[in-house]
Image (cartoon, rainbow, N blue to C red):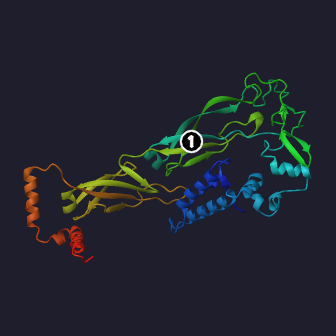
Amino acid sequence: MMATKLDYYAVLEISRDANSDEVKKAYRRLAMQYHPDRNPGDASAEARFKEISEAYDILKDDQKRAAYDRFGHAAFEGGGPGAGGFDFGGGLGDIFEQMFGDMMGGRRGGRRSGSDIQVQVSISFTEAFAGVRKPITVPTRVTCESCDGTGSADRDQGAETCPTCHGAGKVRAQQGFFLVERVCPTCHGAGKVVRNPCTVCRGAGTVERDRTLEVAIPAGVEDGTRIRLSGEGEAGGKGAQPGDLYVHIAVEPHPIFQRDGANIYCRVPLRMTQAALGTEIEVPVVDGSRAKVKVPAGTQTGENFRLRGKGFSVLRSSARGDMYIQVSVETPQHLTRRQRELLDEFEAEAEDHARANPESTGFFSKVRDFFEGKL
């Protein structure tokens, strides 16, 4: 059985009306995320990267994109109208229809899809970690219940075929050597006319209404992720297919944790004595648990301690990131007289500064050599 290919727009996580800059930006973002060099040994990431590259190769080219919008994946496979670009078997009128039909108001019959809707949902850092279901209210157009979306006050009669365009939704006129096609002035591209319009929707077949639905946000989503809900956009006029709903995710920052891809970082300040003598600290984990970390004597600022598998889930993969405890040694401030005396004694009794403080000793040794012309 042949595997079903994903929609190229869904692969790049963009809408069908995205411009070339949006296509390029989406490709760069996803390619960086799933590039094999950044995911060594991850077969699912490699497969995802190939899907992204294939989708971008088609959608970045205006001619290929037009063929894909018209014929889908069949445009680049053997057989069907897509194999040769267009099917010219039906004469000049059908050629014009295939090349420009969608641009002039949709398929024959004039049924236009409803508009796509974009909304933004803010979630907390912990919700992004665990996943969450969020109710959202969308101001949109829905099918008119009074007329069942027909636009007609008489449900039995419904809409009639437009007498001007005969249901095509557009009219053609010969101007010299050119055949010019325009949206039908009578039905405005719908292909049908309503003799007795519905009093609720005034013949449109849809009405404005706030609609509430629940969005399942998977664990591991990043700030800026876009989720597509097919068919949850605005209702199409007079029985046409509805549009899609695009939910943009905004992840709120956390006061303790920071994120880099699937990894989580937690900066922990240590007292100078803790870092010098060694200690054991208890740190929070995003899932609400606690972890104990042993800090060895002589720990320096910038050292990391790794907690495996405590990071974010990786979308479309069973992999999981790690959590890193980043140590920052804090120099004491506002010392008492006795504390200063103790530190003075400590400094005076240090017999081997080079061994106790190798980094500072090495730096100032290089500074001395520099001023003496040795470097």
Q: Quadrant of the C terminus?
A: bottom left
Indicate the secondary structure of the residue bearing disc 1: strand
* Residue density around tag 1, few if under 14, some if 14–19, many if 20 or more, within 10 Å: some
Q: Is residue 359 left or right of residue 61?
A: left
Closer-to-camera residue (294/34):
34
Q: Position of residue 294 (x, y in %)?
A: 27, 61
Q: Which residue appears at 77% of the width and 34% of the height?
A: 238
- Answer above or below: position of 80 versus 117: below
Relative image position of residue 131 (x, y in whole percent): 49, 47
User: Residue 329: x percent and y percent?
Assistant: 25, 57
Side of 148 where 315 appears, left or right: left
Where does label 1 land, which residue? 215
- What type is the residue that disc 1 sits on? Val
- Nearer-the-camera pick, 130 or 182: 182
In the rendered image, the residue lying farthest to the top is: 199
Q: Is residue 140 depicted above or below 95 in this figure?
A: above
The residue at 69%/61% (across/down) is: 3
Q: Position of residue 227 (x, y in %)?
A: 58, 47
Which quadrant would the N terminus be assigned to in this image?
Answer: bottom right
Residue 59 quadrant? bottom right
Please tell me which residue lies in front, 14 or 45.
14
